[in-house]
Image (tube, rainbow, N blue to C red):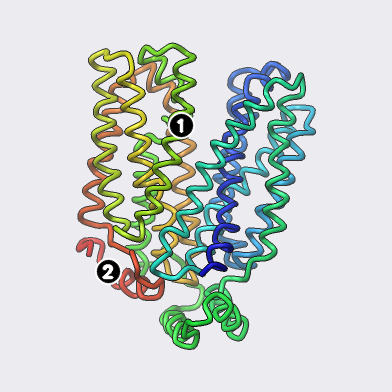
Amino acid sequence: MRKIWMWSITAALAGFLFGFDTVVISGADKKLQALWDSSDVFHGVVVIGMALWGTVVGALLGSIPTNRIGRKKTLIWIGVLYTISAIGSAFANDPITFAVFRFIGGLGVGASTIAAPAYISEIAPAKDRGKLVGLYQFNIVFGILIAFFSNYLLNGIGENAWRWMVGVEAIPAALYTLFAFTLPKSPRWLLTKFRNSEAKTVLQLINPDLDSEKLMMEIKDEMENTIPHENIFIKKYRFPLILAFCIAFFNQLSGINAFLYYAPRILTEAGLAESSALLSSIGIGVTNMLFTLLGIYLIDRVGRKQLMYLGSIGYIVSLSLVACAFFLNWTGVAMPIFLFLFIAAHAIGQGTVIWVFISEIFPNHLRGSGQSFGSSVHWILAAVVPSLIPVLFATIGPGIVFAFFAFMMVLQLLFVAFVMPETKGISLEELSKILIKQKPSNGK
């Protein structure tokens, strides 16, 4: 079991680089706009936004290498992309070159949301799968905190501080790439490629006490029920597809990225001083990490559905309170408290569950494609929803925006209650049998 933990932590470090890469740009944001004298639109869409669109492309296309060359090699290439992006961004002398290298890093982020959870779910025992895949989410929020800390430390070192901010990522990225070479290949991926002897060797390496012949027979049985060149969009896989779409859709329609990207703006609009707003933003990061840890601790004990119930109710209460604060002009410490409650609800529910759940619900030979579909829905909405926030705040007002998010979380609660299955402690092969036979209407 110790080996499985080490391999899972290694694969999950792709999430650390994801979190670090996504947030590190915040420290260089204003410096780059002043340095290159960019317009607000060009700076937002090209200089800052290019990494996000790289993430969307990485999520859309990441299933191709994950399926063809395997989970391990894809994770190695993700490390290479992060390393190239960090070094190239640090040495860029114009906004276009900078944007190209940030786009390359975005490809790594998008692909990591497919390859890392898929890999960990395929080597993890069913009873520990939730917390092991959950390490990926923990590493994301840990990477975000370290990026803020890194930016703070490097901020005062001179004119080229921004180069160090974006370039320092090359160190953990290069180390991660080397660590990824030590990972065994996914046995389930090997079996989908009919490399049975290799798969048996890896299965015995992962768990010497496991009856590898029995597991291989279960995986082969699953493979025999498939047709050549089938994809996740055929009728047979409609239910897992609906589940992946809904959990990714509701993740972003909670307004989580609006909170993370615009926390200082939301707090200042609610009447807080700018310095207090920035301090509260750091508090949001700490809250996110602590409740993610709690979610990882609980996910294999109480199950995915229970965490989603907790998160959904927490979302509805906190978002309703945020909306009321804007409608009724509540000021002072109320808004930060409501935001912390929202972040806690997200971290223990959707934040912990999403990557675990999507990595479990598709059969072995289509896991990469299913993970890609769920990640793509997530990332496209992650690009669209925050970009609309400034316009919506200015036109209909933040109160209505947050009331809408609260209503969407009522719909999520209904999805959890009547559609979402519990996947705790069930082998991937058994889950595949259950979900493929499911009808979306019965939700059992």
Q: Amino acid at mark 1?
A: Leu
Label 1: few (<14), some or many (≥20) within 10 Å? some
* Residue plotted at (30% across, 33% down): 405
Q: Secondary structure at mark 2?
A: loop
Q: Residue at x 44, y 23 (%)?
A: 280
Q: CA distance from mark 2 to mark 1?
A: 36 Å
Write down the quadrant of residue 45 in the picture.
top right
| SS assignment at label 1 | helix
Q: Work out whether 437 lies above or below 215.
A: above
Q: Amino acid at mark 2?
A: Gln
Q: Position of residue 322 (x, y in %)?
A: 29, 25
Q: Position of residue 214 (x, y in %)?
A: 44, 87
Q: Position of residue 254 (x, y in %)?
A: 34, 37
Residue at point 68%, 56% (across, down): 77
Residue 56 screen position, x and y as percent: 54, 45
Residue 438 is labelled as 2
Which residue position is annotated with label 1? Answer: 260
Q: Is residue 308 left or right of residue 195?
A: left
Q: Is residue 216 left or right of residue 205?
A: left
Q: Name the residue: 27% across, 43% down.
A: 312
Q: Which sits earlier in the primary sequence, circle 2 or circle 1?
A: 1
Please identify the residue farthest to the front as the structure is shown.
2
